[in-house]
Amino acid sequence: MKIAVCQFNPIIGDLKGNTGKILSGYMRAVNDGAELVVFSELFLCGYPPLDLVEKKEFRNAVRNAATDIASQTNHVGLIFGTITEDYEDKIGTGVYNSAVLCYDGKIQFIQNKSLIPNYDVFDEVRYFESAKDVFIHEFKGEKLGISICEDIWNDADYWKHRRYTIDPVQKLVDNGATLLINISASPYAYGKRKEKFEMLSVLTRNDKSPLVYVCAVGAQTELIFDGGSMCLNSSGKLDLLGKAFEEDYFIYDSKKKYDEIKKIESSFEEEVLNALVLGLKDYAGKTGFKKALVGLSGGIDSAVVAFIAVKALGAKNVHVVMMPSKYSSHGSVKDSGKLIEELGISSENISIQPVVDKTLEMLKDSFRGLDENITEENLQSRVRGLYLMALSNKHGYLLCTTGNKSEIATGYATLYGDMCGALAVIGDVYKTQIYKIAEFINRDKEIIPIEIIKKAPSAELRPNQTDQDSLPEYELLDKILRMYLEEQKEFEEISASIGNKEIVQKVLRLVDLNEFKRKQAAPVLRVSTKAFGYGRRFPIVQGWRK
């Protein structure tokens, strides 16, 4: 069968735009001689629709759009993801995450999702019912076994530990499916595409059935979908692979012989950089922003964010502002100037010192008799936040925050200061990883000045300050954080690995105490298996760790 894979980028709730993409992709595939056209999970309404699903008006509009799309089909089949309802079901929501198959002017077959995930960033149990059963649909000489995303992530031959007792894909195979189709919206994390292929390879090889796996692409707030749709033959070999981090369209002939594709992923630095560029580009485009604003400090974090903004929106649409104080080094301003020139972006230099001095003068009586402490440091950051928000409001800039995961984890950031902004571009990238990405950016020529990469990290809020005055070395810090946040290890296990209980206790305490800051932070673009945001939910008020 000739199957058109439409790896397109929807917008959540944009039924008109998403319908247009479905119909244009369908007509293109019809003209190209395809027999079946496939789009990704919940493509019609966008994934994840969250509480839009609870709106009856929204569900009705989705149903009407699906019916309208089906009415425009001919003998060529069309599969896309959408919401459906069972109006007779009096228990539960009666709402399903579904794949609909349309041809000859109407919806001919519906397969609901069986495995409803409820972990990490997934909250589908809140909205959707599980399929009552799975069925085969015969179409153009093939017995189609259609499933949706999580349904295929429970193969007994691949997973040592499974989340679910049932395996809907195995049931489709047992029922005689000759061609497997899975429509997916699986959020990106580095390494996941390779894992995905390995799992699908085992499944197709053991079940001796070809598979068309159509993946979502694009970013929806903090979630990034990397595309990389896969077509595997019945021997478990990868025949075709969709582009990563961009839309793609191709036709797969399940009867044709292809050269095996073996390269699934690029390096960490290239993959994550491309993911972050897509994340920022889509956030800006889908929310109506055309230009980005970055506070440029002379440090590596803001330099990398500025580079990402240029890649996402173009140099003419990126503006940076330097905001020196009396503690800012001459090198920081000079290094920022070199970066600005290299990137070809607009900039301005506005000192915060007059405002800081005036504010301290006005607070002199309130602060009388008290020693200087972090209050004065935070004041400087908050003045910078004031400047940035004013520029954002006046010019309509999308303000990007520049804090990395190491800082966000430990609270090494100031609320209403450097945390001001709409999107935390590198908030899921550890400090040590930022250096690797900077070196990758400079792989062919020096874009980020080497002086920025080599200088000791510093907030420059007091004389001769460095990050390591109050934090462990970043290599050690990031190792502890990765074990705690992503590997779900606890104090004793981490301490045994690190060999220093005191440092581990300090770091874990910082993570736990600063939950209140993260609850007020900008959305974080997710590129790891455990990012800050609604995929990691911890109480602010708690007494677990003394």
Image (cartoon, helix red, strand yellow):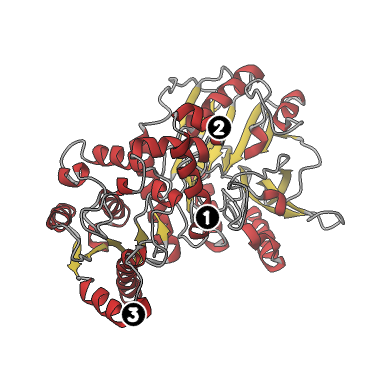
Name which residue lies at 43% across and 39% down.
503
Badge 1 element: helix
On the image, the x and y values in percent for residue 41 come to 60, 46
On the image, the x and y values in percent for residue 516 come to 52, 59
Out of 399 and 473, give the one closest to the viewer: 473
Instruction: Identify residue for label 3.
Output: 363
Q: Is residue 114 left or right of residue 367?
A: right
Earlier-in-chain disc, 1 versus 2:
2
Name which residue lies at 77% across and 36% down.
134
Instruction: Identify residue for label 1.
Output: 515
Q: Residue furthest front?
A: 369
Q: How many marks?
A: 3
Measure how far apart labels 3 and 1 are at the Cα level: 29 Å
Instruction: Identify residue for label 2.
Output: 492
Measure how far apart labels 2 and 3 are at the Cα level: 45 Å
Q: Is residue 58 left or right of residue 228?
A: right
Q: Give the answer, above or below, for where 189 lies relative to 48.
A: above
Badge 2 element: helix
Q: Are marks 1 and 2 in contact (CB under 8 Å)?
A: no
Q: Is residue 364 something that shows in the picture?
A: yes
Badge 3 element: loop
